[in-house]
Image: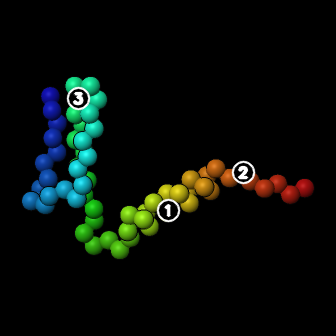
Amino acid sequence: MTDKKQNTTDRRPDCVTEIRMGNTVLVVSGYFKKDTTATAADKMMKVLEAESHAGQKPHHTA
């Protein structure tokens, strides 16, 4: 019943997170693009900017 995606390369994950919920342990492995120029901070800034713009109400001029 366990579905495991096999990594076709022999590359180790860049990050691994374990979350425990009762008797269940969820393991999430993450990989970053090898040739990227954006940092994690750059990506988080984009997320925060998008959330900021989504929360703004349009200005009405009458």
* Closer to viewer: mark 3 or mark 1: 3
Compared across the picture, whether 36 is left or right of 4 comes to right
Q: In which quarter of the image is the N terminus?
A: top left
Compared across the picture, whether 42 is left or right of 22 comes to right
Q: Position of residue 54 (x, y in %)?
A: 61, 52
Image vertical order of residue 34 relative to residue 60, above or below: below
Tag 1 residue: 46
Q: Quadrant of the C terminus?
A: bottom right
Residue toward you, 17 or 6 = 17
Assign a secondary structure to mark 1.
helix
Kindly indicate whether the residue at mark 1 contacts the one at mark 2 (C-beta within 8 angstroms): no
Kindly indicate whether the residue at mark 3 contacts the one at mark 2 (C-beta within 8 angstroms): no
Image point 22% across, 33% down: which residue?
A: 25
Q: How crowded is mark 1: few (under 14 residues within 10 Å), some or many (20 or more)?
A: few
Q: Where is residue 15 in the image (x, y as percent from the top left)?
A: 24, 55
State the image quarter where residue 61 is shown. bottom right
Residue 24 disc label? 3
C-alpha distance separating marks 2 and 3: 42 Å
State the image quarter where residue 4 is shown. top left
Q: How crowded is mark 2: few (under 14 residues within 10 Å), some or many (20 or more)?
A: few
Tag 2 residue: 57
Image point 14% across, 58% down: which residue?
A: 12
- The kind of residue tagged 3 is Thr
Image vertical order of residue 4 relative to residue 47, above or below: above
C-alpha distance separating marks 3 and 1: 33 Å
Q: Position of residue 20 (x, y in %)?
A: 26, 33
Assign a secondary structure to mark 3.
strand
- The kind of residue tagged 1 is Lys
- The residue most toward the top is 23
